Amino acid sequence: MNYREHFYSNYTSSQARHTSKEDLMRTVAENGKSIVTDVLPHISGDKDITILDLGCGFGTLVLCLQRLGYRNVSGVDISKEQIDVAIEIGAKNVVVGTLHEALSNTVEKVGVITMIDVIEHLTKNEAIEVLQSCYDKLEEGGTIVMRTPNVDAYFGTVLSFGDLTHEMHLNKLSAQELFASLPYKFVQILPARHSDANLAAKILKTMMSPFTALFHRLQCVAYGMSSSMLLTSANMIIVVRK
């Protein structure tokens, strides 16, 4: 057994560590909030558009889109355990499979491909191959929406290196370099919004924001870097179009 088989075979229980279905549903609801703010603005409002969620995990995005009335949403994940959970919580059209199988088995062109917390699990060679296959599978003007950890964030290594299945660690510049090597016409790298766990955290962040922004600018000046080169959010949203 290689390390991927070892970790992905029980990825939900080893990584998410949910103790009950109620605990899992709370996580789904919380993740749904970030999807609404970070992902949905980049997806067409056409409820008949074909959407393929690569690495769908336990189906949070698929379930969210289906509840919003999108009729042609499907998902694939390499972990049977995660797909079993996705089906249990109500996600439809989700199957076990690799990214390559999903892109090869989909006959028709798709309008949107989503990859939420996925690309960091790929090697550079795999990422290039998958993103080229995505380009071929997208209809003209189609969109990819991705979320991935940002190593430039405060405590950025927690997300980037806190999962042993992560292969690639990106910041804004390396993400731009990756897509510059591919034929996509439009690339946008955006900060992901942090979902405040409670009111106290929201108030504290609001109070600290002016000081952290000033500190960030001073750091850029001190080290001779442009602030436009950096993102400080824990995750990045990457939006690309064919």
Image (spheres, rainbow, N blue to C red):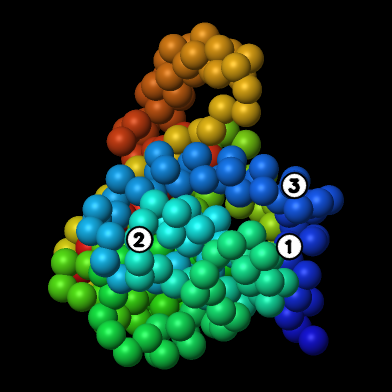
Mark 2 crowdedness (10 Å alpha carbons): few <14, some 14-19, many ≥20? some
Q: Is residue 219 left or right of residue 18?
A: left
Residue type for callout 1: Thr
Question: In percent of the image, x 35 and y 70: which residue is there?
Answer: 72
Separation (CA) of disc 2 from disc 1: 26 Å
Residue type for callout 3: Glu
Residue 80 visible, this angle? yes
SS at badge 3? helix
The mark found on residue 12 in the picture is 1
Q: Is residue 181 left or right of residue 64?
A: left
Q: Position of residue 217 (x, y in %)?
A: 39, 21
Identify which residue, 199 or 26, lies in the foreground: 26
Mark 1 crowdedness (10 Å alpha carbons): few <14, some 14-19, many ≥20? many
The residue beneath circle 3 is 22
The residue beneath circle 2 is 70
Residue 177 visible, this angle? no
140 in relation to 114, above or below: below
SS at badge 2? loop
Image quarter where the C terminus lies is bottom left
